[in-house]
Amino acid sequence: MAAGGVGIRCQVYRRPDGYPEGRHVTRTAACCESCGSPEPDEQLRPVYRIYLETDGEGRVIGERVLPDLERWCVPCRTLYPNRPADDSSQPGPGAP
């Protein structure tokens, strides 16, 4: 569930074996809030999104951590800057 209490759901269409061509069933799955990919709930983890701040030459000079928790899939957690919600070694967003 997203930080604001709004559940995000995706519709995934699958044609099970034995069904005539063109007939589909619907399965509801949770979605990654970064890329929108439908994922099993157990694959999504709560993270804080981080935006890197750069200078005019593209060098990282800081970061901005967003205050809202998002649920991300494994590829997004691996590829994009984020802070796991359960990382007690780092202060949360807005902390002094």
Image (cartoon, helix red, strand yellow):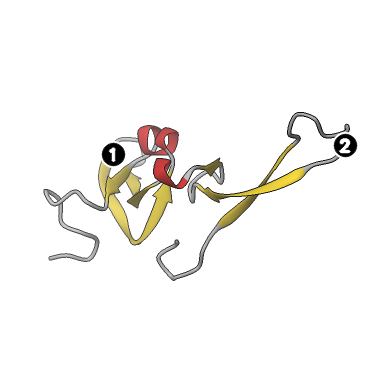
Q: Where does the image place residue 88, in percent across and percent down from the top left?
A: 14, 52
Pick out the residue farthest to the front.
18
Picture quadrant of residue 73: top left
Crowding at mark 1 (Cα within 10 Å: few <14, some 14-19, many 20+): few
Q: Quadrant of the C terminus?
A: bottom left
Q: Which residue is located at x 56 percent, y 46 percent?
A: 36
Q: Disc 2 versus disc 1: distance between alpha carbons? A: 50 Å
Between disc 2 and disc 1, the foreground one is 2
Q: Answer yes or no: do the residues labelled 2 and 1 have beta carbons within 8 Å?
A: no
> At x 71% / y 48%, what residue is drawn?
26
| Of pointers 2 and 1, the one earlier in the residue sequence | 2
Q: Secondary structure at mark 2?
A: loop
- Nearest to the observer: residue 79 or residue 56: 79
**Where in the figure is residue 93, as x and y percent of width and height?**
24, 61
Q: Amino acid at mark 1?
A: Val
Q: Quadrant of residue 57?
A: top left
In the picture as drawn, the residue positioned furthest to the top comes out as 17
* Residue identifier under label 1: 60
- Give the residue pinned by disc 2: 22
Q: Name the residue nearer the viewer: 68 or 86.
A: 86
93 up-or-down from 27: above or below: below
Q: For the N terminus, give its image quadrant.
A: bottom left
Q: Position of residue 10 (x, y in %)?
A: 62, 51
Q: Is residue 1 left or right of residue 59?
A: right
